[in-house]
Amino acid sequence: MLIAGITFRRFNVFPENSSQVLNQFVIYVSLPALILITIPKLQLSQNFAMVALTPWLALLLSVLLVLLLSHFFNWDRQTKGVLLLLVPLGNTSFLGIPMVKAFFGEDAVSYAVIYDQLGSFLALSIYGSIILVMFGKDNHSISFQGILRKVITFPPFLCLLTAFALQNIELSSLYFSVLTPLANTLVPIVMLAVGLQMQLKPESSHLIPLISGLVLKMIIVPFLIYFIFWIAGFNGKMYQVVVFESAMPPMISAGALAIMAGLSPRLSASLVAYGVIVSFVVLPSLYFLIG
């Protein structure tokens, strides 16, 4: 589906805004359906707090490392802003959930959903908004009400709250038979949308930030988290999924926001596109290493 998306883009098979339309379908239909069938089956424990907190730990590590490299390479303001936005925020939904399902199985998807909704999505809404205001061309003030409204009206987040409320209710087979086909559309539609959005022409001046950002995002930070878990004695599938999710490439939504804010659009597009390509090598390798 990824190759199909790239091919369709090359020959202009789909209208220009098709990737945005497919993304909206995933946000309003596929991902909510997936959340509504996976979360009610969860047996909640204190360990789930670790799943929700780890993306914030990854964010903190990423910010510190980006600031360090930015000082060392003396990157300009736009480059620094792009990396501060895209390195901490991973593609834990559109790419992460299909990858977790493929490598760890259906029963591990719930961990990915928690990581994405209580970690990556909230980080995009709160931290992402702050970075866009600080480094974007339009210097608007940050509105707490605006951020809160964005969070509580986001369809997958609303479905997450609904799904938690359904945990103590016995759901009928009809409930799952209606939602499961909708949830199954997530993987093919997401990968097609990613292929339609890929831009593979970085500028030569962006090579060092591009490589540095991807190495930090997909190799160094995940292994730092794995090392922290190893020192703490944490192990098992849940922790493997968390480390795996932390290695996802830069978030597509964050890249789109960076482009709209005028934050080095070519570098933003390259980080997202090459991140997806590199993930097909890094993620299987990481899976076998942490397994």
Image: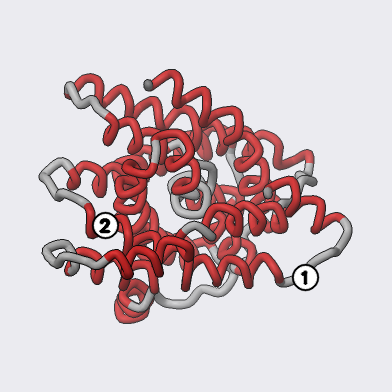
Q: Given the image, on which type of amino acid does mark 1 rest?
A: Glu
- In this image, 58 relative to 92: left or right? left
Q: Is residue 51 above or below residue 11?
A: above
Q: Quadrant of residue 246?
A: top left
State the CA–CA distance, disc 2 to disc 1: 35 Å
Residue 78 in the image, given as x and y percentages of width and height: 60, 54
Residue at image coords 26%, 26%: 228
Out of 137 and 172, give the one closest to the viewer. 172
Quarter containing the C terminus:
top left
Q: Which residue is mark 1?
A: 16
Q: Secondary structure at mark 1?
A: loop
Q: Given the image, on which type of amino acid does mark 2 rest?
A: Ile
Q: Residue furthest right?
A: 11
Mark 2 burial class by Cα count in 10 Å: few <14, some 14-19, many 20+: many
Out of 198 and 240, give the one closest to the viewer. 240
Residue at image coords 58%, 39%: 74
Q: Which residue is mark 2?
A: 39
Q: Quadrant of residue 160?
A: bottom left
Q: Is residue 54 above or below residue 188?
A: above
In this rendering, the label closer to the viewer, 2 or 1: 2
Mark 1 burial class by Cα count in 10 Å: few <14, some 14-19, many 20+: few
